């Protein structure tokens, strides 16, 4: 069964990071493992993906379907969370306060439980947290 993974870059105050917020991250994604996450994905989901098709793909394939959270894709990532289609969250936490912008969890998704399955801290104090949805949670 395939996994739907959401990749997001957020600041300490919970906003999706602007590309100007932490330039090294955007300029050198390979140093932070971002390139590998993107390359390892079976497919990158765009905002027009059909959830019916996605449900069939999840059942019929293995691998990762990646949805990257950006201001443009927030309706998709919000829906993936609301309809329990997302299986994993990979959150890059940037060590700064941005003070404005879009929030990853703008709406309030239904209660769910997630387990931390991996962490990594990088130079520059950027941390990656990898969560997996707890079955039934």
Image (cartoon, helix red, strand yellow):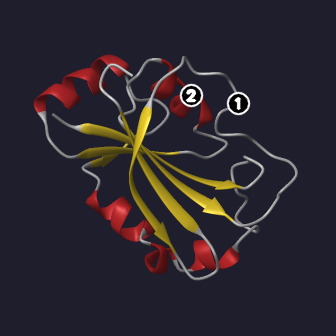
Are dots 1 and 2 in contact, CB under 8 Å?
yes
In the image, residue 59 lies at what x, y percent?
15, 26
Q: Residue at x 47, y 23 (%)?
A: 112
Relative height, residue 132 to residue 59 (above, below): below
In the image, residue 89 lies at what x, y percent?
45, 44
Mark 2 Cα within 10 Å, few/some/many (few <14, many 20+)?
Answer: many
Q: Which residue is drawn at 69% across and 50% down?
A: 16
Q: Quadrant of the N terminus?
A: top left
Relative height, residue 120 to residue 54 (above, below): below
Instruction: Identify the residue position indicated by label 2 in the image.
Output: 78
Q: In which quarter of the image is residue 137?
A: top left
14 displayed left or right of 27 = right
In the image, residue 110 lies at what x, y percent?
54, 17
Instruction: Identify the residue position indicated by label 1 in the image.
Output: 106
Relative height, residue 18 to residue 132 (above, below): below
104 displayed left or right of 28 = right
Q: In which quarter of the image is residue 107?
A: top right
Q: Is mark 1 on a helix, strand or loop?
A: loop
Q: Which residue is drawn at 57% across and 82% down?
A: 123
Relative height, residue 71 to residue 107 (above, below): below
In the image, residue 95 lies at what x, y percent?
71, 67
Q: What element carries label 2?
A: helix
User: Disc 1 and disc 2: Cα gap in Å?
Assistant: 8 Å
């Amino acid at each position: 069964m395939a996994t739907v993974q959401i990749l997001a870059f957020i600041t300490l105050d919970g906003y999706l990071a602007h590309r100007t917020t932490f330039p090294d991250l955007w300029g050198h994604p390979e140093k932070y493992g971002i390139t590998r996450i993107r390359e390892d994905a079976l497919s990158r989901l765009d905002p027009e993906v059909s959830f019916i098709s996605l449900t069939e793909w999840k059942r019929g394939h293995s691998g990762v379907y990646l949805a990257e959270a950006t201001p443009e894709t927030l309706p998709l990532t919000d829906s993936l969370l609301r309809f329990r289609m997302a299986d994993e969250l990979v959150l890059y936490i940037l060590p700064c306060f941005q003070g404005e912008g879009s929030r990853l969890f703008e709406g309030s998704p239904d209660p769910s439980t997630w387990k931390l399955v991996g962490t990594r801290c990088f130079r520059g104090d950027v941390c990656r947290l990898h969560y997996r949805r707890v079955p039934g949670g």
